[in-house]
């Protein structure tokens, strides 16, 4: 999945219960809805400062969240 740099919101349960394992979220994202990554993902990379988007890890309870502070 490649997100456009204009993406500002990932909705509630947007990517829940799919087969994605790793995802990189662009720094344009300001909000991620509850359970957006429910039941999947091994790692989530976010190109933002740590905890700048609340709700970590957005339903992916076993995921490693990597904050790339820009």
Image (spheres, rainbow, N blue to C red):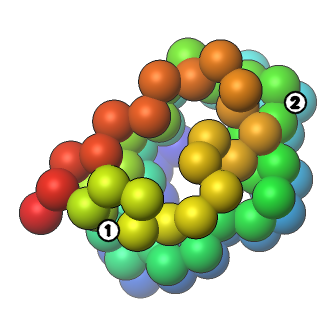
As drawn, is 19 to the left or to the right of 12? Answer: left
Q: Where does the C terminus fall, quadrant-wise? A: bottom left
- Crowd band around label 2 with a 10 angstrom C-alpha radius: few (<14), some (14–19), many (20+): some
- Crowd band around label 1 with a 10 angstrom C-alpha radius: few (<14), some (14–19), many (20+): some
Label 1 to label 2, Cα distance in Å? Answer: 24 Å
Above or below for 21 versus 38:
above
Measured as percent of width and height from the top left, residue 40 is found at 73, 24
As drawn, is 30 to the left or to the right of 36? Answer: left
Q: Which tag, 1 or 2, sits closer to the chain's start?
A: 2
In what element is the residue under mark 2?
loop
Measured as percent of width and height from the top left, residue 68 is found at 21, 48
State how many labels appear: 2
User: At x 36% / y 62%, what residue is drawn?
Assistant: 26
Above or below for 26 versus 23:
below
- Mark 2 sits on what residue? 17
Disc ID at residue 27: 1
């Amino acid at each position: 999945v490649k997100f456009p740099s204009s993406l500002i919101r990932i909705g509630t349960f947007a990517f829940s219960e799919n087969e994605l394992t790793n995802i990189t979220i662009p720094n344009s994202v300001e909000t991620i809805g509850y359970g957006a990554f429910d039941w999947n993902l091994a790692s989530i990379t976010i190109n933002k400062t740590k905890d700048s988007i609340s709700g970590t890890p957005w339903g992916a309870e076993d995921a490693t969240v990597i904050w790339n502070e820009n």
